[in-house]
Amino acid sequence: MKKAICPGSFDPVTLGHVDIIERAADIFDEVTVLVMSNKSKKQSLFTVAERMELIRRSVSKPNVKIDTYDGLLVDYAKQNGAVAIVKGLRAMSDFEYEFQQALTNKSLYPNAETMFLCARGENMFLSSSMVKEVCSLGGDIRPFVPQSIAEDIYNRCKGDKSND
Ligand code: ADP
């Protein structure tokens, strides 16, 4: 069974993420969406548990699992027998950082390959931070996030931030 991991912070999950996750699920037998807690990032909008729940309500493929990990991604890959780390690439601006990460992960754990899927044209500009910014300024985020979770994002933008 070929297993892959789609890692990220997913704060919150967007249609760009869902597209990459579902395309990976068409290629691999099992895909784990791995919500990294990313302590170095500034305050998050949703807790890790909430982000996992929003992903659960956004992705319907039966071979997609959702998990969290606060250690090294390659250690999770090793422990869970994953052969690939699948990432979405939007623009050249993503590339340098992603390339550096891929090379680092390859030297730490040569048995897993990083694979890049190109973002769809309509998702090229889409990011969690853009969604948060539009939402906090009262804009319409429905074109950017799964319909089933838009309300949760609106409500959170109006209220308090998470304590993650
Ligand atoms: P991080 O916070 O670690 O950068 P994100 O949660 O933003 O991670 O994204 C997780 C993964 O999804 C990354 O591989 C990222 O490149 C990819 N991704 C993010 N937004 C999009 C998008 N609009 N289209 C395709 N892939 C995307």
Image (cartoon, grey):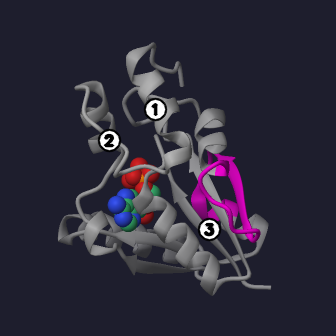
Please tell me how crowded label 3 is: few (under 14), some (14-19), or many (20+) other residues with Cα within 10 Å. many
Residue 131 visible in this rendered orientation of the protein: yes
Residue kind at label 3, given as amino acid type: Ile
Q: Secondary structure at mark 1?
A: helix
Q: Are marks 3 and 1 in contact (CB under 8 Å)?
A: no
**Distance of label 2 from label 3 (alpha carbons):** 24 Å
Please tell me how crowded label 2 is: few (under 14), some (14-19), or many (20+) other residues with Cα within 10 Å. many
Residue kind at label 1, given as amino acid type: Ile
The residue that label 1 is drawn on is 153
Residue 9 visible in this rendered orientation of the protein: no
The residue that label 3 is drawn on is 5
- Residue 3: quadrant of the picture: bottom right
Q: Secondary structure at mark 2?
A: helix
Residue kind at label 2, given as amino acid type: Val
Going 40% across and 61% down the picture, which residue do you hit?
Answer: 16
Q: Are marks 2 and 1 in contact (CB under 8 Å)?
A: yes
Estimate the x, y position of residue 21 in percent, counting from the top left: 55, 68
Of residue 131 and residue 138, the one placed in the foreground of this image is 138
Estimate the x, y position of residue 164 in percent, counting from the top left: 54, 25
The residue that label 2 is drawn on is 131
Q: Magenta segment, which residues? A: 56-76
Q: Earlier in the sequence, mark 2 or mark 3?
A: 3
Does 164 sit above or below residue 27? above
